[in-house]
Image (cartoon, rainbow, N blue to C red):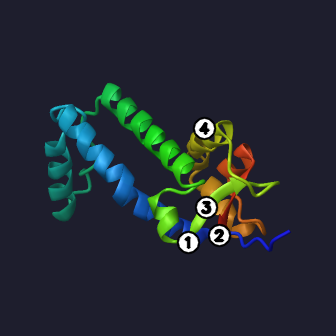
Amino acid sequence: MKEVEYAGFWIRFVASFLDTLFLALPVGILIYFLSDGSWFDFTQYQANLQMAMAGNAHALEKQPHTSMQWELLFEFSLLIVTLLFWKRWQGATPGKRFVHIQIVDAKSFEAISNTQAITRSLGYIPSTFLLGFGFLLVAFRKDKRSLHDLLAGTCVVYED
């Protein structure tokens, strides 16, 4: 059996940042234009930013209007795009591919199943809602698995 090198917190963070740039941002821009600007109100974001820059402590009291319909379309579209990349690139998105890491089954170190991919994606929800602790588990575990990895039976390793 080959020696497995688990991907740690920072390399995964870099991959996630790159995926935000290469996947989430383009999908978000597309959805925003498809919604004809009704997904969320940029003018309120700008007003909040201006108030915050001026030192106004009430800058975040009024939040921009967000359309749940368009938000759900964005989240679903991002899920589908991510799953397609995982299938095409054996458990890697563009960010993971760039830093040479991939998601694999935690026991066999083979490609993940569709069920694991969906479970892992949905596992981001509790990882996030636990104040990000689900992501921070990577820093404390020898096998560098996050909460969503544990739920899906996956791990992130460096490519061969």
Outermost residue to the top: 69
Specify the quadrant of the image occupied by residue 64: top left
The three-letter amino acid code for the residue at tag 4 is Ile
Quadrant location of the C terminus? Answer: bottom right
For numbered disc 2, what is the local secondary structure? loop
For numbered disc 1, what is the local secondary structure? helix
For numbered disc 3, what is the local secondary structure? strand
Of marks 2 and 3, the one in the foreground = 3
Q: CA distance from mark 2 to mark 3?
A: 9 Å
Q: Earlier in the sequence, mark 2 or mark 3?
A: 2
Residue 29's disc is none
For numbered disc 4, what is the local secondary structure? helix
The three-letter amino acid code for the residue at tag 3 is Gln
Residues tagged 2 and 3 counted as in contact (Cβ below 8 A): no
Q: CA distance from mark 4 to mark 2?
A: 21 Å
Location of residue 122 with respect to 6 vertically, above or below: above
Drawn side of residue 1 relative to residue 18, left or right = right
Q: Earlier in the sequence, mark 4 or mark 2?
A: 2
Q: CA distance from mark 3 to mark 4?
A: 16 Å
The three-letter amino acid code for the residue at tag 1 is Ile
Q: CA distance from mark 1 to mark 3?
A: 11 Å
Residue 53 position within the rendered picture, expressed as x and y whole percent measured from the top left? 19, 64
Q: How many marks?
A: 4
According to the image, label 4 marks what residue?
118
According to the image, label 3 marks what residue?
102
Residue 1 position within the rendered picture, expressed as x and y whole percent measured from the top left? 86, 68
Residue 11's disc is 1
Residues tagged 1 and 3 counted as in contact (Cβ below 8 A): no
Of marks 3 and 4, the one in the foreground = 3
Residues tagged 2 and 1 counted as in contact (Cβ below 8 A): yes
